[in-house]
Image: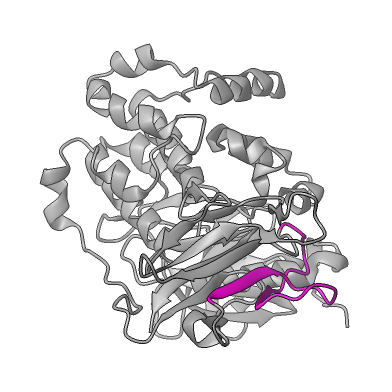
């Protein structure tokens, strides 16, 4: 049954879904339009409407699924993420109601007053840490996607459609707004432009984008040169791939010298050599000790102390929320479990549903309970008796956090994130 959506062009004063009155239009992108609205109690909130009527019918369902995922991401418990409040559908078009951030975005804040760079960096990194701990990667971090809350804190937003990994769909349906796609390239790491590596997006993607953003806030320019037209794009991306950024411009600023080591670590082209997570970057933030006492530390909402065993919970993917209790899945004397894309022609103990893409191999990886070290170990690929080499590796790789896993294996423990294709599984205890 095709998804039917009617055109909705709401104006100031209009009522949306018999619940919210439009106060003003905050912005519009390729897929969505954001309004400031008031509920019946007079509370000011932000409402993001998915313009489903402009989307080709064959991709509407998958787009709605990703929009639902954006709503769920906004429910992560963090002061440094813009919170989702509720959601609904109007004339066939889904919408999300979010907390309203009256300070606008980071670019407008920077143009109006001198920013406390250490505070900005710390808040953004805390938001990234919360996302990454839940198996999410923002994918589209830039100043426009950092908002200023009522209390002056900075919070991440727009962790859904615009930053979706599936660029093929995004570029196919840019709806006459190519600049939105073009502008995003300024913050993209080299591996996102590599067709193979695009299959799995890791936290290090956000680390690179963070480095570009902080450089821009400090210097007023982008690190790899001008990006005013498509003619600049090839040279800009080439410089990014080679790590050829303008260090002298940074050092010429009053605060640049203090930030050079952090930005250097963020902009390393090879993601495996880049700073690996938000905590590593936080440790390099200048004047961190001054800002840190005001930072609210988020508590983990899952069990980390192993009592009965270890489980994997799908945090991102088509089987979102599904749980696999590894120790309970073992049969007989076997200590091995197989994991791969669900396919009627191949058996896997853990069969991951992936109908919208094929980035997960049918025989993707192997999990083994290693009694000698007292830990579960993950290996890329699976044994294949029909393969001449015996062991067949996956096509797009297996990752624990941001580290690529070899056939020799890597131990994992509660809190780790396993990435295969665009599916992310969090390791928890039970």
Q: Nearer the viewer, residue 111 or 340?
A: 340
- In front here: 151 or 326? 326
Q: Is residue 357 magenta?
A: yes
Residue 281 falls left or right of residue 7: left
Q: Residue 359's image quarter?
A: bottom right
At x 40% / y 79%, what residue is drawn? Answer: 42
**Residue at image location 67% in from the left, 41% down from the top:** 181
Picture coordinates of residue 83, whole percent (x, y) = 41, 69
**Secondary structure mostly seen in the magenta stretch:** loop
**How far across and down, in percent of the image, does residue 5 sit?**
79, 74
Q: Is residue 255 above or below residue 351?
A: above
Q: Which residues are magenta?
A: 335-359
Report which quarter residue 185 is drawn in: top right
Quadrant placement of the N terminus: bottom right
Q: Vertically, is 249 above or below 13? A: above
Q: What residue appears at the point 29 percent right and 52 percent down from the top-left corner?
A: 123
Is residue 411 highlighted in magenta?
A: no
| Residue in front for this viewpoint, 266 or 308 | 308
Left or right of 249, for residue 137 = right
Protein image colouring: one colour
**Total marks drawn?**
0
Specify whether 115 is left or right of 141.
left
């Amino acid at each position: 049954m095709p998804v039917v959506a009617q055109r909705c062009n709401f104006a100031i004063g209009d009522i949306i879904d018999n619940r919210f009155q439009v106060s003003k239009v905050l912005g519009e992108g390729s897929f969505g339009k954001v309004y400031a609205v008031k509920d019946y109690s007079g509370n000011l909130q932000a409402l993001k409407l998915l313009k489903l009527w402009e989307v080709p019918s064959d991709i509407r369902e998958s787009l709605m699924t990703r929009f639902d995922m954006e709503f769920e991401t906004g429910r992560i418990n963090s002061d440094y993420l813009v919170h989702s409040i509720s959601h609904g559908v109007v004339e066939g078009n889904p919408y999300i109601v979010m907390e309203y951030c009256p300070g606008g975005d980071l670019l407008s804040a920077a143009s109006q007053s001198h920013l406390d760079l250490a505070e900005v960096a710390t808040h953004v990194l805390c938001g990234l840490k919360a996302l990454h701990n839940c198996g999410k990667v923002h994918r589209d971090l830039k100043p426009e996607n950092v908002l200023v809350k009522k209390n002056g804190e900075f919070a991440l937003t727009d962790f859904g459609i615009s930053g979706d990994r599936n660029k093929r769909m995004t570029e196919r349906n840019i709806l006459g707004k190519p600049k939105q796609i073009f502008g995003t390239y300024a913050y993209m790491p080299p591996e996102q432009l590599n067709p193979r590596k695009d299959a799995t997006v890791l936290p290090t993607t956000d680390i690179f984008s963070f480095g570009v953003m902080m450089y821009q806030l400090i210097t007023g320019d982008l690190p790899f040169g001008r990006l005013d037209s498509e003619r600049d794009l090839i040279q800009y991306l080439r410089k990014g791939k080679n790590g050829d950024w303008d260090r002298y411009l940074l050092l010429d600023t009053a605060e640049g010298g203090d930030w050079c080591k952090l930005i250097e670590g963020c902009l390393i082209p090879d993601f495996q050599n880049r700073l690996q997570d938000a905590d590593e970057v936080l440790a390099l933030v200048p004047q961190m000790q001054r800002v840190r006492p005001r930072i609210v530390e988020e508590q983990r909402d899952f069990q980390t102390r192993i009592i009965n065993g270890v489980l994997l919970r799908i945090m991102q993917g088509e089987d979102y929320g599904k749980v696999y209790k590894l120790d309970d899945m073992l049969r007989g004397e076997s200590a091995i479990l197989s994991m791969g894309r669900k396919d009627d022609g191949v058996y896997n103990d853990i069969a991951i549903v992936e109908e919208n893409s094929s980035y997960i191999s049918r025989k993707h990886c192997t999990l083994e309970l290693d009694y000698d070290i007292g830990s579960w170990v993950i290996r890329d690929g699976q044994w294949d008796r029909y393969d001449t080499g015996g062991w067949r590796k996956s096509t797009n790789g297996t990752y624990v956090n941001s580290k690529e896993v070899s056939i020799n294996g890597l131990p994992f423990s509660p809190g780790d994130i396993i990435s295969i294709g665009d599916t992310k599984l969090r390791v928890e205890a039970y």
